[in-house]
């Protein structure tokens, strides 16, 4: 079973780093901006069934690059990535979520607040996220740098995709 | 012609192929509406690393190799189906070859002559340049956001600190105002940067005087202003306050201390204390401590003042007793000035050292020819004092025959000039003084009993200075004031050490000796303050080595004789020094030495 999952979020929130940590278990401190999309693949065993996750690592959404709807089509789910140290990236994620839902309807997604390794300088606190939780959002705290929360993020979404498929 | 066209078409095909290779673009044609494509022309160099086949007309299923292309072909299908001539672009995507090298690609679907074509181009230098530009722009945005964040945090921290500082300042200001401290803060130019409510109230100005010079809020004399300026220019704190007189509608006395600001050396803190009440109290105390020309606020002197007031109301004869230098004549003057006779004359006569006839002539007058040298009629002191007061000092030294005449004056209120027979009525009040013990003189037969009782109707005993040491600072200060006035010297203070010596000295010569000592010290004083070195030797000499430190008032003539001898001994026979030690004039000393038959060779 193949599932297309889009990685969405503002620029430099750590989308590529999260995919890289998940797929290759590597991390680089250097920031390389993405243009277009890179598709990575990882097979997960979910409930005894192999699920091939096609991870579409999309470029960061900002004033320079807007997300092309064509990249989103065919997605089974998506992951919204937020940089905990930049409050404005949560607003970007919220905007992207509305775009995706408008295009693809209510498909499974999860939100991860990245960079939990520097939580002392986070600008996003639980209060800002509690409302989203109340709306049914699945929210993770994690770090591509340390790997915290990465596996569970993808695994949880894969479970939901599988559950939806069955 | 035909072959020419054929040749031209072949050349065009070659050119197109070379062009696509140069553009690193692979051209594929869709085969029979399937997901299989045939490679057209020459494949670019990168093609094989991703899609394998390189030799046309080999076929390839690109969707199998690239998930991205697979989705794109789905989108392209719609364009191909419409046989539209327009382009369908994929947008850039990234593929990684087996060696890990990343390639940035972009696919375009189009229809040419009903042929469904797929162009896959490698994005080259332009793309990399755009990517680098975007990278820089985003890094710049991140840095800017970071800097903004830091700035916001710093601003927030500074705002908090400022708020805390302001709160602390307000608290301290509240405490300062609560303490009621009258404070002015000035900058290096002498401009006011802060004025407390208390200071504003004290100086009768508003608190919005910041920026003005301190002189503008302080109405005082030029001397006071100069003194403050001197303090303001001094870098060191001076603890002794300046006393200044505020010349406003509501005049005040202020003590002002000027201190450097603890953190800003160029700033000054002026702290004002309203001492008006203190000055008023001092003045009242001073007035209370002065009675006519007498100075002293000790209980014994207060009793004397009251006694003088009481005695002044009546006409009784008064005997004023006290050691030499205790101010007996001053008491006599005070009685006169407080009495109903104050408009009349006050005549003082020292009865010691005169012969019988000379003293009689002095007191009662004489008629021309009454004795050798009496070249004209002469009224005596009693006649001159008619309607007033006669003060007879050293009455114990009056010869017996003059005592008789004096008794007549007291009894009959009349005198008889020498050489006359007819008495003259006089309206005189008699005050007498002596350092003798007249009762002993009566026993010895040198003083008439009836005269003693006549002159001792009222009696005032003046305490020696050693018995009212509390008055010494007051007296010293009063004498210093007199010295300043008469000498024009700026001496206005006595050091605490010098004052300590003055307080511990025995003062055998009493107040007169103290006055002499102050004059002596003021003459020798180089500055504004009298120090121990300025005082006479007998005061600074260790008391244990000073025989007179154990001075006791003479209660008998024997005591006084011994006292005179001690003084002479201490002064090594120098009469002037001995007189000074005893607090008496040289003439008095000579007279007393003669009385006791003490003969010191010159």
Image: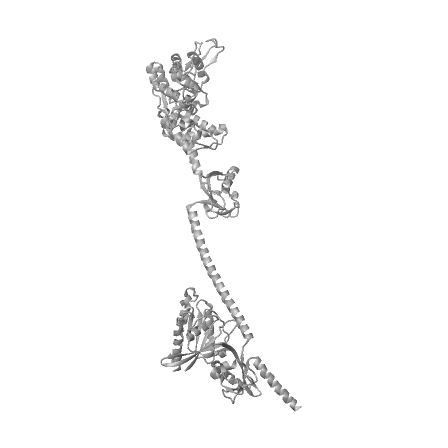
Q: Is residue B91 visible?
A: no
Q: Nearer the viewer, residue A162 or B169?
A: A162
Residue B433 drawn at (x, y percent): 39, 20
Quarter of the image containing the C terminus of chain B?
top left
Q: Nearer the viewer, residue A107 or B44?
A: B44
Residue B234 drawn at (x, y percent): 49, 42
- Residue at the spot 49% in from the left edge and 28% down from the top edge: B487
- How are the residues colored? one colour
Q: How many marks?
A: 0
Residue B373 lies, with reference to residue B513, above or below; the image says above
Q: Is residue A26 visible?
A: yes
Quarter of the image containing the N terminus of chain B?
bottom right
Furthest residue toward bottom: B2
Residue B518 in which image quadrant: top left
Furthest residue toward right: B1
Residue A153 lies, with reference to residue B537, above or below; the image says below
Residue A144 in which image quadrant: bottom left
Residue A145 lies, with reference to residue B8, above or below; the image says above
Q: Nearer the viewer, residue B389 or B474?
A: B474
Residue A102 drawn at (x, y percent): 47, 77
Residue B545 lies, with reference to residue A93, above or below; the image says above
- Residue at the spot 38% in from the left edge and 17% down from the top edge: B396
Residue B567 drawn at (x, y percent): 39, 21
**Would residue B555 be found to the left or right of residue B36 on screen?**
left
């Amino acid at each position: 079973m193949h599932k297309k999952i889009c990685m969405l979020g503002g620029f430099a929130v750590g989308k590529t780093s999260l995919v890289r940590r998940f797929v290759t278990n590597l991390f680089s401190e250097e920031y390389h901006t993405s243009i277009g999309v890179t598709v990575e693949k990882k097979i997960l065993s979910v409930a005894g069934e192999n699920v091939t996750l096609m991870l579409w690592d999309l470029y960061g959404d900002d004033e320079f690059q807007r997300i092309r709807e064509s990249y989103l089509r065919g997605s089974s789910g998506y992951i919204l990535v937020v940089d905990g140290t930049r409050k404005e990236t949560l607003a970007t994620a919220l905007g992207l979520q509305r775009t995706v839902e408008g295009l693809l309807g209510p498909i499974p997604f999860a939100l991860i607040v990245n960079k939990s390794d520097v939580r002392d300088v986070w600008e996003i606190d639980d209060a800002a996220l509690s409302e989203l939780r109340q709306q049914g959002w699945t929210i993770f705290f994690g770090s591509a740098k340390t790997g915290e929360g990465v596996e569970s993020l993808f695994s949880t979404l894969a479970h939901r995709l599988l559950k939806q498929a069955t | 012609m035909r072959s020419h066209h054929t040749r031209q078409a072949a050349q065009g095909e070659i050119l197109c192929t070379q062009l696509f290779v140069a553009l690193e673009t692979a051209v594929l044609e869709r085969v029979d509406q399937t997901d299989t494509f045939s490679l057209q022309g020459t494949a670019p160099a990168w093609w094989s690393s991703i899609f394998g086949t390189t030799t046309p007309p080999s076929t390839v299923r690109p969707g199998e190799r690239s998930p991205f292309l697979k989705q794109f072909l789905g989108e392209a299908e719609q364009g191909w189906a419409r046989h539209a001539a327009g382009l369908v672009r994929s947008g850039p995507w990234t593929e990684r070859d087996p060696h890990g090298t990343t390639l940035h690609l972009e696919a375009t679907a189009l229809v040419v002559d009903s042929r469904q074509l797929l162009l896959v181009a490698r994005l080259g230098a332009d793309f990399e340049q755009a990517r680098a530009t975007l990278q820089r722009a985003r890094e710049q945005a991140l840095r800017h956001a970071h800097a903004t964040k830091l700035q916001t945090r710093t601003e927030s921290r500074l705002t908090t600190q400022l708020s805390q500082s302001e709160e602390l300042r307000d608290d301290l200001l509240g405490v300062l105002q609560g303490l009621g401290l009258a404070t002015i803060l000035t900058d290096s130019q002498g401009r006011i940067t802060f004025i407390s409510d208390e200071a504003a109230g004290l100086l009768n100005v508003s608190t919005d005087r910041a920026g003005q010079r301190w002189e503008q809020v302080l109405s005082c004399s030029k001397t006071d202003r100069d003194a403050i300026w001197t303090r303001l220019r001094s870098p060191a704190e001076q603890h002794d306050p300046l006393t200044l007189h505020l010349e406003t509608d509501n005049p005040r006395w202020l003590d002002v201390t000027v201190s450097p600001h603890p953190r800003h050396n160029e700033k000054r803190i002026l702290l004002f204390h309203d001492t008006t009440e203190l000055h008023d109290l001092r003045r009242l105390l001073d007035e209370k401590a002065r009675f006519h020309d007498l100075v002293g606020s000790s209980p014994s002197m207060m009793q004397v003042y009251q006694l003088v007031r009481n005695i002044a109301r009546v006409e009784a004869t008064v005997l004023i007793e006290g050691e030499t230098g205790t101010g007996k004549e001053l008491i006599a003057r005070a009685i006169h000035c407080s009495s109903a006779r104050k408009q009349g004359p006050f005549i003082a006569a020292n009865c010691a050292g005169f012969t019988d006839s000379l003293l009689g002539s002095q007191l009662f007058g004489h008629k021309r020819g009454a004795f050798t040298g009496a070249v004209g009629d002469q009224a005596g002191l009693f006649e001159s004092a008619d309607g007033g007061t006669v003060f007879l000092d050293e009455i114990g030294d009056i010869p017996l025959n003059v005592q008789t005449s004096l008794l007549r004056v007291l009894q009959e209120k009349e005198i008889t000039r020498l050489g006359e027979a007819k008495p003259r009525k006089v309206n005189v009040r008699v005050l007498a003084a002596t350092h003798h013990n007249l009762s002993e003189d009566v026993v010895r037969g040198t003083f008439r009993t009836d005269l003693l009782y006549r002159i001792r109707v009222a009696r005032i005993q003046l305490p020696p200075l050693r018995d009212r040491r509390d008055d010494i600072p007051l007296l010293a200060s009063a004498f210093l004031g007199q010295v300043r006035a008469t000498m024009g010297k700026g001496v206005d203070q006595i050091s605490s050490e010098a004052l300590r010596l003055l307080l511990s000295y025995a003062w055998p010569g009493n107040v007169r000796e103290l006055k002499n000592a102050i004059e002596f010290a003021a003459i020798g004083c180089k500055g504004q303050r009298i120090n121990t070195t300025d005082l006479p030797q007998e005061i600074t000499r260790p008391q244990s080595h000073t025989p007179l430190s154990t001075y006791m008032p003479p209660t008998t003539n024997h005591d006084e004789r011994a006292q005179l001898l001690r003084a002479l001994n201490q002064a090594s026979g120098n009469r002037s020094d001995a007189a000074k030690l005893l607090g008496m004039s040289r003439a008095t000393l000579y007279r007393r030495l003669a009385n006791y038959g003490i003969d010191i060779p010159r």
